[in-house]
Amino acid sequence: MSLPHGLLGVFASLACGLALAQQLPPEVDAALARAKVPRDAVSLLVVDAEGKSPPRLSHRANVPVNPASVMKLVTTYAALELLGPAFSWSTPVFVEGAVRDGTLFGNLYIKGQGDPKLVIERLWLLLRRVQGLGIHKIAGDIVLDRSAFEAVDADPASFDGEPLRPYNAAPDALLLNFKSVVMTFVPDRTANTAQVHFEPPLAGVQMQTSVPLSNGVNGASAACGDYRAALKADFSDATRIRFGGTYPASCFEKVWSVAYADPRSYNVRAVEGLWREMGGQLAGTVRDGRVPALNGAARNPTLQPLLEPAFEIASPTLAEVIRDINKYSNNVMAQQLFLTLSLPVRGQNGSQTSVAATQEASREVLRRWWTDRIGSNDLPTLDNGSGLSRNERISAQALARLLQTAYRSPLMPELMSSLPISGVDGTLKRARAMPQGSAHLKTGSLRDVTAVAGYVHAASGKRYVLVAIANHPNANAARPAFETLVEWVALEN
């Protein structure tokens, strides 16, 4: 049966548009060739953000690939919709026993509930509020409750062999300072040493507080160069941090963060070390445990001291937290947020159920949300929500639909403002090849994976969704090609 002439024309136009969309821009094609990344190793999609016109470019857009940290777009936008931009995490503190003459005759409990930004400054404020209750000595223990999340007992070296990189920290219901030690090196030329300041102080850990300065020929300052290698730091012993080298005098002040060698004991050491540094006294120990039930009927007041909620501290809002997650690609914060999606809601009496959040429960929450909001097609393969995974998969088409859905949403400003701006901030601050300020793009990088996805504002006034992902041993060399693609979109008149 022959088709009407007009319908033939429609099909011809669609076929022509598809052919044009599949054809790579010559400058992008050339950049991929220079990078020795074959076309069949990349997925590219450029489409109108409002979804009102055919794709400007589509190449292998329906193939599920490893997106690296671009997967954080799924986690952060789902969280904005499911939790709301004003959502915040609370960390309650409970006092068990009476307070007399500055002494708590009982235990102090700190219950973690997933706060992804309980950094050292906020832990200090929490302990300062404890002292504000008139407690300067604790006759019992400080008990850290981490039961809100199922324990993720991962080897920090298992992913990429870099156990001291803070991004490899495992999620934790009571995540303190990303389980990291922050070292600040301050050269003192008079003493010919660099002073080393550590945050937080860790109980039971010897920390070398100075290191010799190194000078160049005839007393001239040595070039700064790779000061970390020059220090010859030894972090292998969890009870001692030391340096076998020197610090270049020309480096001025530097700050270096490393993951603590024994993450299981980090919280206990950090809380005790900071409490004692603040002048607090502790007769017992700092230990892991659980907050006892608040139900008075289940307790024997003649045997057990009264447990009372003292106060709670609140995290920054979700809208603020996702800026850290996306602009700086913070993996452990993304995993905290991912687990929060399955965190049980508070009961009517303010208590928390005993069911812990789990990765599988969060995957199910996200799958249901995706089906309801984005559709049942191209359902992503989820792991931990951060992209720090060899198992996560998503297609460029699915990511584009997510970004188009977000663009039409009232939450679009929160998501877009969380993304790095080309040539301005975050992981795109040094992306000088892209037109400055023209794009808001999430970046992703793993061994054999490079990706960018987000929004590009063209000179024509149109805004496009752009997704570009390479899965190949030379993937890192594809960055210039992706920057060329962003420029190609941004310069459209």
Image (cartoon, grey):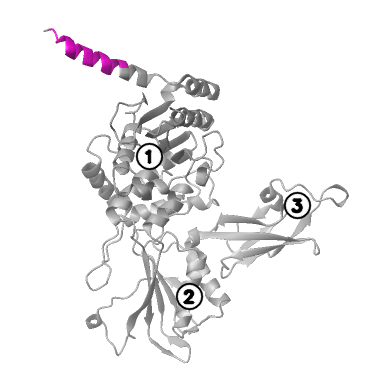
Q: Tell me the crowding category of disc 1: few under 14, some 14 to 19, or many 20 or more residues within 10 angstroms, Cα based.
A: some
Tag of residue 203: none
Q: Which amino acid does label 3 sit on?
A: Ser
Residue designated by label 1: 391
Q: Where is residue 266 in the image (x, y as percent from the top left)?
A: 50, 64
Q: Where is residue 406 in the image (x, y as percent from the top left)?
A: 31, 43
Q: Position of residue 485 (x, y in %)?
A: 46, 28
Q: What residue type is labelled 2?
A: Leu
Residue 105, compared with residue 246, is above or below; it is: below
Magenta residues, start to end: 2-16
**Quadrant where the C terminus lies?**
top left
Which circle's residue, 1 or 3, is located before the other in the chain? 3
Q: Distance between the residues labelled 3 and 2?
A: 38 Å
Number of numbered discs present? 3
Which circle's residue, 3 or 2, is located before the other in the chain? 2
Residue designated by label 3: 250
Residue 320, compared with residue 295, is above or below; it is: above
Q: Is mark 1 on a helix, strand or loop?
A: loop
Which circle's residue, 2 or 1, is located before the other in the chain? 2
Given this view, does label 3 or label 2 mark the residue nearer the observer? 3
Residue designated by label 2: 127
Could you tell me which residue is drawn at 54 percent across and 25 percent down? Answer: 35
